[in-house]
Amino acid sequence: MKAVVAGTLLGLLTVVPGLIAEGWADEKALQEAREVVRQIEARYEKTKDLQADFVQKTRIEGFERPVTSSGKVYLKKPGRLRWDYLDPATEEIYVNQDDVRVYVPEHKQVLVGKLTTMAASKAPLELLQGASRLEESFEIEPTVGKERGVGGVRLLTLVPKAKEQETPRNLQRIVVEVFPKTYFIRTIALHEISGNVATFEFSSLKPNVGLGKEVFEFKAPPDVEVVKAPVLNGP
């Protein structure tokens, strides 16, 4: 019996330190993640407007090569966004609070809808709109694994909070990387339940340049057809 007890105690002495170390590491990771969130929110709280270039790479489950596009994004408080795709095709997305207009010159159409129901456009736009209050819309976790962002800053995983009367999401999580000194968002990776991953990388950021309201106001050409946007279930 004494031998059994001694063996049990010896086992505990070897296992418990490992559990303590693991718990300490998890707590440290969570603290780091919360500090990154605090820095992001503080940065975007001070940002009245912002313009940047972006490259989007979408990896579709079952396809070897990603689909790549690029353009420019403009942000102005409160709640104004403009998202211009320039290559390989032109498309302009205008957001005013919850109102969205998607202009496709090639089709001579403008889709009109609500951000809360146009899920295909929602995730990156909602994230940029609400970067100063992330914890209102997302559960925040340290990203699993040893990979870190530029400058060794911890990556964040954002899990969208479920809201009443909301269209079901195909979005599983968002992984966010920031610039190490400014804490502006550098990359957003949208992970869908289907396995598809869309990554947006931002560069040439210019904050507080005094963007005018005219940048965010869409004026439809006379030959453009206005179409009500469908409700989508993607990110």
Image (cartoon, helix red, strand yellow):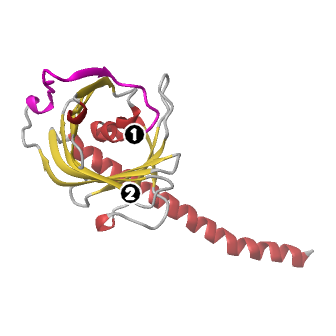
Q: Where is residue 168 in the image (x, y as percent from the top left)?
A: 51, 31
- The magenta region covers 213-235
Name the quarter where the C terminus is drawn. Answer: top left
Q: Position of residue 149 (x, y in %)?
A: 34, 63
Residue for point 85% across, 73% down: 5
Q: Position of residue 11 (x, y in %)?
A: 75, 74
What secondary structure do most residues of the magenta stretch adopt? loop
* Residue sitting nearer the eye, 188 or 225: 225
Q: Which amino acid does label 2 sit on?
A: Pro
* Residue sitting nearer the eye, 53 or 11: 53
- Asked whether residue 4 is drawn in magenta, I would say no
* Residue 184, visible in the rendered structure: no
Say which residue label 2 marks: 66
Q: Where is residue 136 in the image (x, y as percent from the top left)?
A: 39, 35
Name the quarter where the N terminus is drawn. Answer: bottom right
Say which residue label 1 marks: 135
Element marked by disc 1? helix
